[in-house]
Image (cartoon, rainbow, N blue to C red):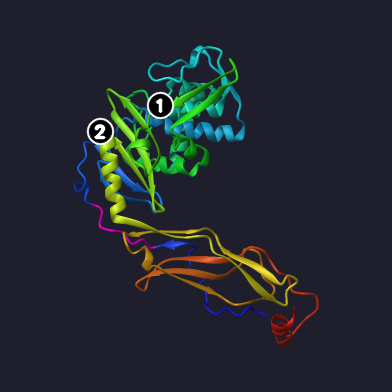
Amino acid sequence: MKKLICVLICAAFILCVSIPVYAETDNSKTVETSAVAFVLYCPQNGSIILSKNENEHKKPASTTKLLTSLITLEQAARGNSTVTFTDKMTAEGSSMYLEYGDTVKLSDLAAGMMMCSGNDAANAAAIAISGSYEKFSGVMNSRAQSIGMKSSHFVTPSGLDDDNHYTTAHDMALLMAEVLRNKQLAELISQKSATVDFIKPEKHMTYTNHNRLLSMYSYCIGGKTGYTDAAGRCLVTASRRDNLTLICVTLDDKNDWKDHTALYEYGFSKLGCYMDNEFTAEIPVAGGEDDFVTVSADSSCELVVNKGVESKIKRMVKLDSFLFAPVMQGEAVGEIEYSLNGKTLKKARLKAQNGAEIKSGKKGLLEKIKELFFNG
């Protein structure tokens, strides 16, 4: 017998379709900056809040190391090998002071890149992973394409200038969003310092994070600095306030600390985030080998809306009080709808997390109902 469903779910319904409600935040003159190019981006819904020349090719300097460190930690997660520093890995500029013969874990090179912007750490990671800078460049560009960075091309793992090494403010915002999805890297860039345990020689080195915004702006959760004469000052950061995450990228900006703070304050004054934790419920099953099935949404709900309307969002759960066996694992059995002033913002399917087979022996509808209400 087919299960009785209180509310029919449209077969064409798409899981977790959001219709975001934005403030009018597309005027780049709202916040004056010194940046040649910048973007204020919300990774929770993929929207650009403010921008200027966000698709213009620019040199990223050491903010490149966000990509190099991401690749490094992804490789380390598959096998955190040891790396011995050689003369092929030497680099000019900022350093974590690796010397010939020094041996560290691959993952520790990311700490050297993210804290003190070690060019030597970036080179060491590139050689350790790919065997040459040219091959690692291919890895960088492939990973960038997978993120959606369509207007970027990377040549050097450290970000030292090259005519064919470029990106855009928008692409760097996409990269930072990917960085935040990597728990290990997100944790690393949130720290004001990190200690590396050298394997050879046996010693412990503590490095201080160059990202001063971690101390200057209380909502900052991480980022990466960069500078060369050709690129100017570059800064990629992320901040979180009241469940809303924003990413700011400034390229060639003489007042980047001040500009990031101003842009974040603007964004947080205009937008808010409605959060609903992952919905889970135990639903009785009539006529099943199992008495209950667990029903849940695939994920928690995040809705970016105009500031101040978060409390006005309504949640409606459309789910029967009981289900008839059989219930298949993964079967859609209901939905959650989020709305504001009568307008649907998001819908999410509720799925059975476990199945329930029909109990042995055929039973009629009345027996199933009696079993539901009188057994136990």
Q: Secondary structure at mark 1?
A: loop
> Is 371 or 132 nearer to us in this picture?
371
Name which of mark 2 and mark 1 comes first in the sequence: 1
The quarter in which the N terminus is drawn is: bottom right
Circle 1: residue type = Val
Q: Quadrant of residue 360?
A: bottom right
Q: Is residue 349 left or right of residue 244?
A: right
Residue located beneath label 1 in the image: 155
Q: Quadrant of residue 211?
A: top left
The quarter in which the C terminus is drawn is: bottom right
How crowded pointer 1 is (Cα within 10 Å; few <14, some 14-19, many 20+) is rated as: many
Residue 278's spot in the image, x, y percent? Answer: 53, 60
> Is 167 or 298 nearer to us in this picture?
298
Q: Is residue 12 visible?
A: no
Label 2 – label 1 distance at C-alpha: 23 Å
Q: Is residue 75 visible?
A: yes
- Residue at 74 percent across and 80 percent down: it is 375
